[in-house]
């Protein structure tokens, strides 16, 4: 059952709700529940914070009893539902519908870079835009992590900086500038949105169960298959780490290995060309892995089916960009390989854009 509790907003920014005498951090999706102000009585879902989750460790406002029960009626003819058959179902105008405002005639099929988790989005977008200034790069947010499109601070900053030209939430994900019923529908609309290249991956807070298939990284399999089925040049950004404390994610993550093993078609897998020894402290910790061992693991998984390509990366340039340099508590200094992978992938994506695209 849903863990729902009554509370009172004691601070609007950052949102803090008093539940049972305890002030707790919270988040409200204002596109669904409306504005939230100090003194409002709200119903919050407390399960994530009760469980002590990491990136999702906050209460979520389910409804604002003070001012959130006067929602506007859906526009006429808008009958496609997101989060359908739940108490949060709401209608959207999908990209797959007829005569969607803002869609052009389209152009060359844009290459798609499939991301294993949200932490790859900013480095990949930065590298792609740096390799090809003015690139019209879009982001398709999929299942596998957080579903609300408004939750990601990275997306907001990338849009503000002009590093992303647009944002689509596909499948169960919702709340972006555009909605798509399916990943295929989102990718098919990319050229008509004026995008020259696509980043495709889950929102923040990837799901995981420590098993081979029970994790949000499996969304990459669906995304890659959708891109391949549409005939798009398809790249997969590998999840790599030199210092993740979990052995299944150190070196080549089992998330990426599983997807590459299960893929029914061939993709390109960019990897960074970088000497991790000596960056930035001149020492490697006892749990660090070297790049040759990562390449060996990738070649073993890819065999003759997938094309492993090596790309130079500018870690120091990204570190100075002001974009996120921390993943799951580790900084870019502590785990440069994690950030080097999407930087290499972003550069490869830019190179895959057709001339004149």
Image: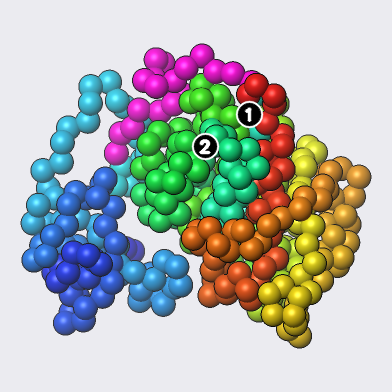
Residue 71 shows in the view: yes
Using the image, determine if residue 187 lies above or below residue 333.
Answer: above
Which region shows up in magenta? Answer: 90-108
The structure residue drawn at horizontal position 69% and vertical position 45%, both measured from the top left corner, is 347
Tell whether position 18 is magenta: no
Using the image, determine if residue 76 lies above or below residue 39.
Answer: above
Structural crowding at the residue carrying mark 2, measured as other residues with C-alpha within 10 Å and reported as few (<14), some (14–19) or many (≥20): many
Q: Is residue 302 left or right of residue 87?
A: right
Residues at circles 1 and 2 in contact by the CB criterion of under 8 Å: yes
Depth check: give the residue in front, 5 or 117.
117
Q: In this view, does 294 lie to the left or right of 80?
A: right
Query: What's the distance in space between the residues labelled 1 and 2, CA to CA?
Result: 10 Å
Tell whether position 92 is magenta: yes
Q: Name the residue under label 2.
A: 138
Q: Mark 1 points at which residue?
A: 110
Q: Is residue 177 left or right of residue 193?
A: left
Disc 2 is placed on an element classified as strand
Comes first in the chain, label 1 or label 2:
1
Residue placed furthest toward the bottom:
286
Quarter location, residue 227? top right
Q: Magenta: predominant secondary structure element?
A: loop
């Amino acid at each position: 059952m849903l863990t729902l509790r009554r509370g009172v907003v004691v601070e609007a920014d950052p949102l803090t709700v008093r539940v049972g005498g305890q002030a707790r951090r919270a988040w409200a999706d204002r596109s669904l529940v409306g504005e939230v102000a100090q003194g409002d009585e709200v119903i919050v879902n407390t399960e994530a914070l009760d469980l002590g989750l990491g990136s999702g460790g906050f209460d979520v406002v389910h409804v604002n009893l003070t001012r959130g029960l006067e929602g506007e009626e859906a526009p006429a003819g808008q009958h496609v539902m997101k989060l359908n058959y739940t108490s949060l179902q709401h209608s959207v105008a999908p990209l797959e519908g007829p005569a969607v405002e803002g869609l052009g005639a389209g152009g060359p099929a844009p290459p798609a870079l499939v991301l294993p988790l949200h932490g790859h989005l900013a480095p990949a977008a930065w590298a792609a835009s740096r390799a090809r200034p003015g690139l019209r790069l879009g982001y398709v947010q999929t299942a596998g992590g957080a579903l609300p499109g408004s939750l990601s601070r990275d997306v907001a900053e990338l849009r503000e900086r002009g590093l992303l030209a647009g944002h689509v939430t596909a499948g169960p994900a919702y709340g972006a500038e555009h909605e798509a019923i399916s990943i295929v529908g989102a990718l098919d609309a990319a050229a008509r949105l004026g995008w020259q290249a696509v980043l495709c991956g889950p929102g923040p807070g990837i799901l995981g169960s420590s098993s081979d298939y029970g994790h949000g990284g499996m969304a990459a399999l669906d995304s890659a298959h959708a891109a391949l089925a549409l005939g798009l040049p398809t790249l997969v950004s590998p999840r790599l780490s030199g210092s993740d404390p979990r052995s299944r994610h150190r070196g080549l993550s089992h998330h990426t290995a599983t997807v590459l093993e299960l893929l029914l078609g061939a993709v390109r897998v960019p990897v960074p060309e970088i000497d991790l020894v000596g960056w930035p402290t001149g020492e490697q910790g006892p749990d660090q892995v070297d790049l040759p061992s990562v390449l060996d693991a990738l070649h073993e998984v890819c065999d003759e089916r997938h094309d492993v390509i090596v790309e130079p990366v500018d870690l120091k340039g990204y570190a100075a960009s002001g974009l996120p340099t921390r993943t799951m508590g580790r900084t870019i200094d502590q785990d440069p390989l994690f950030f080097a992978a999407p930087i290499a992938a972003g550069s490869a994506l830019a190179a895959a854009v057709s001339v004149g695209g």
